Image: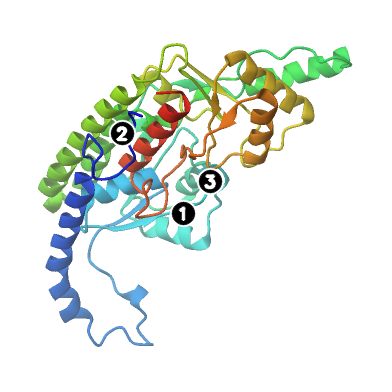
Amino acid sequence: MNCLPIDPQTPCNLATLRERRSRARQKWRSVFAVGLTAGLVGCATASNPPETVTSGKPTVVASYSVLCDLTETIAAETIDLACLIDRDRDPHTYSATPSDRERLEKAQLILYGGYEFDTAVESLVDATQNSAPKVAVNEEAVPQPLMGHHHHGEREKHEGETEDAHSHEEEEQSEAEAEEPDPHVWHDVQNAIAMTKVIRDRLSAINPSQAKLYAENADRLIRDLEELDRWIQAQISTIPAGQRTLITTHDALGYYANAYDLDALESLQGLSSDESPTPSRVKELVEIVRQTGVPTLFVELTANNTTLETVAREAGVKVSDRTLRTDGLGDRGSETGTYIGMMKSNTCAIVEGLGG
C-alpha cells in the first residue's frame, strides 16, 4: 500500500505545518498575554461580560472551514476570526442565525466562497450594510472555473413509462443539466495556493502593520501546499491504468479529477443530504456503477449513505470505509481538521479504493 496513513511518518512530512502553526500561535499568545492580563484583570465581572471587551485586532469573518483554516494559518493570532459555518454542517443547507448577521455587520473583512457554494452566506453579504471589503475568494482565486452540471449521461425511457411522463422527465433533466460554475475549487491544490495569495493580500490591506508576517506565513504555507500537490500526484500514479474512474455522490471532485489525472469522474446524483431518490433512480444508479466497472464507491459526509450502500450492494461493489470530505474540514485535531490533512485523507481513501 503506497498511500500511508496520515501521521508524522508520512513521506512528504507535511506534519511540519502544524508545528509551525503551533509555534506561531505560541509567539502571539506570549505577546498578547501581558497586555491581556494587565488590561482585563478586574474587568470581566457580571456587569462587564467578556463579549464586551474588544481586543483591538481586526475582525474577520470567513464563511466555511477551508477558508477559515487558510486564513488562520496566515494570520495566526493577529485577527479576531469568526467562522460562520460549523465544521459538522453541510454548507449547502446552512441557514444564518442572528449572531451571524451581527458578525457580518461588525467585520472589517468578509471572506466567503462564491460561485453559489455558500448561498446563504452570499445572501447575507448582499443584505449587509457593512462597507467592509467582501471577497468571494473562490471567484477571485479561480476566475475561470470548471463548469459542471447535475446529471451525467442520458436517461433511457423506462418500461411502462408514458411518452408524456418521459418527455416531462427529459425536460426536468435538461434544466438540471444547465452548466454552472463548480465552486469546489480547493480540491486542486494549485487553486488553494491561489486562494492563499488572495487571503494574504486582503489581510495585508486591512492590517498593513502585519503585512510582513502575512507574507512570511503565506510563503511557508505555499511551500507546504506545493509539497502536498506533488505528494497527491505520486499517490494517484500508483492506481493501475483502467481503474481510475472515481464515483462519488455529487459533483464536488471535478477539480481533483482534472488536476490529478483520474480518467473519469462519475457523479451519482440523487444521493445528497437533502434528496431521497426514487426506486427508478436507484435502479439507474446501479446500472451506472455496473457499466463503469469500478471496485469501490466513495461515501461523502453530506451524502445519503443508506441509499449509497443499497446501490453498492445491488451493483456488487464495495463502499469505502473512509469518508470523503468534499465540502469542508473535520473536527479540530482530527486527521481531516486542516486543509492539508483533509486532502491527504481523501487521497488515501481514493488510492486504497481504486487499487493503488
Crowd class of label 2 (few under 14; some 14 to 19; many from 20; radius 10 Å): many
Residue 294 picture quarter: top right
Residue 44 is situated, as x and y percent measured from the top left of the image, at 31, 83
How much space separates mark 3 and mark 1, taking CA atoms? 8 Å
Residue displayed at 32% across by 35% down:
4
Residue 139 picture quarter: top left
Residue 42 is situated, as x and y percent measured from the top left of the image, at 25, 88
Which residue, given by chain and number where applicable, does mark 1 sit on?
A: 86
Secondary structure of the residue carrying tag 1 is: loop
Which residue, given by chain and number where applicable, does mark 3 sit on?
A: 90
Q: Earlier in the sequence, mark 2 or mark 1?
A: 1
Q: What amino acid does circle 2 point to?
A: Ala
The front one of 299 and 6 is 6
Locate the N terminus by quadrant: top left
Coloring scheme of the render?
rainbow
Residue 76 is situated, as x and y percent measured from the top left of the image, at 21, 54
